[in-house]
Image: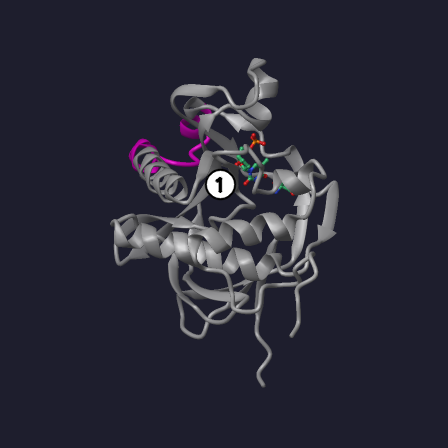
Amino acid sequence: MARRTKIYEGKAKTLYEGPEPGTIVQYFKDDATAFNAEKRDVIEGKGVLNNLMSEFFMLGLGQIGVPTHFLKRINMREQLVRSCEIVPLEIIVRNYAAGSLCKRLGLDEGTQLPRPVVEYCYKDDALGDPLVSEEHIAAFGWASQQDMDDILSIALRVNDFLSGVMLAVGIRLVDFKIEIGRVYDGDFQRLVVADEISPDSCRLWDIKTGQKLDKDVFRRDLGSLTDAYSEVARRLGVMPNNPPSPSKPTLVN
Ligand code: TMP
Ligand code: ASP
């Protein structure tokens, strides 16, 4: 078997050259990190769950006309995506106060925001992905004004879509982060949703109980991350037939 060319190894995924020019294979690892990788662990089965959930969200976005980099899922851990140039911004949309917003503005966790709030962080691990304003983005040329208009519109459409999908399965979408890529078609550039959409990059709370079903379980040591992610996958109907290493014993006949 031919050896693949590794393009990039990130904290939760590894990227390999795809079978055709302009394609990339995204391999979802089981590694979990938080606080800029100060806290790390390997959570068996996380990569499989995130691969399946990200496929589900990207396909759904495609169906409502939001362009994404997703082409097809290859197997339980890998998906084929269009290669794109990642805009060096993390785009965060918040519906309820949580995480760094609570710290920054002294809000109580769970306070509903008067409207979705969109924030931008500059993607730079060494700097800890600092919050930046549109002034910084324009001044340093990270994205044009046209790009920013398109990014805002995409971010709000993703928010409406994800909020609705989650609400339908009894989950509140508190906030999420997306990344945007540039794809070139001849002389034209299009923006697409890239990277992944999974409980690693969202805050998800059970509507009835408030139970956290996202990476905060790992960040704050609130229990089993596999159980939390499996619950989201099960409600969305994308749970694999052989659930990855359940932490509870199951009855074998
Ligand atoms: P924050 O409240 O820590 O700023 O996080 C906002 C959202 O962004 C939350 O859904 C978690 C997600 N996020 C990432 O996906 N990657 C990150 O590196 C960080 C810090 C947050
Ligand atoms: N993804 C980031 C990291 O590892 C932070 C986080 O999600 O909390 O370091």
Q: Position of residue 191 (x, y in %)?
A: 33, 47
Q: Residue at x 33, y 37 (%)?
A: 160
Q: Position of residue 121 (x, y in %)?
A: 51, 32
Q: Position of residue 24 (x, y in %)?
A: 46, 65
> In this rendering, would 60 be left or right of 108?
left
> In this rendering, would 109 be left or right of 148?
right
Q: Amino acid at mark 1?
A: Pro
Q: Quadrant of the C terminus?
A: bottom right
Of residue 114 and residue 13, the one placed in the foreground of this image is: 114
- Cβ of mark 1 under 8 Å from ligand 1: the answer is no
Residue for badge 1: 88
Q: Residue at x 29, y 48 (%)?
A: 66
Q: Position of residue 135 (x, y in %)?
A: 42, 22
Q: Quadrant of the N terminus?
A: bottom right
Quarter of image, ligand 1:
top right
Q: Is residue 142 magenta?
A: yes
Q: Residue at x 47, y 48 (%)?
A: 197
The single residue placed furthest to the top in the displayed view is 106
The single residue placed furthest to the bottom in the displayed view is 1
Of residue 203 and residue 235, the one placed in the foreground of this image is: 235
In what element is the residue under mark 1? loop
Q: Residue at x 35, y 57 (%)?
A: 59
| Picture layout, residue 75 above or below residue 14 | below
| Picture layout, residue 84 above or below residue 38 | below
Q: Is residue 172 magenta?
A: no
Q: How many marks?
A: 1
Tell me where the magenta segment starts and ends, as one range: 136-151
Of residue 70 and residue 45, the one placed in the foreground of this image is: 45
| Picture layout, residue 5 above or below residue 66 | below
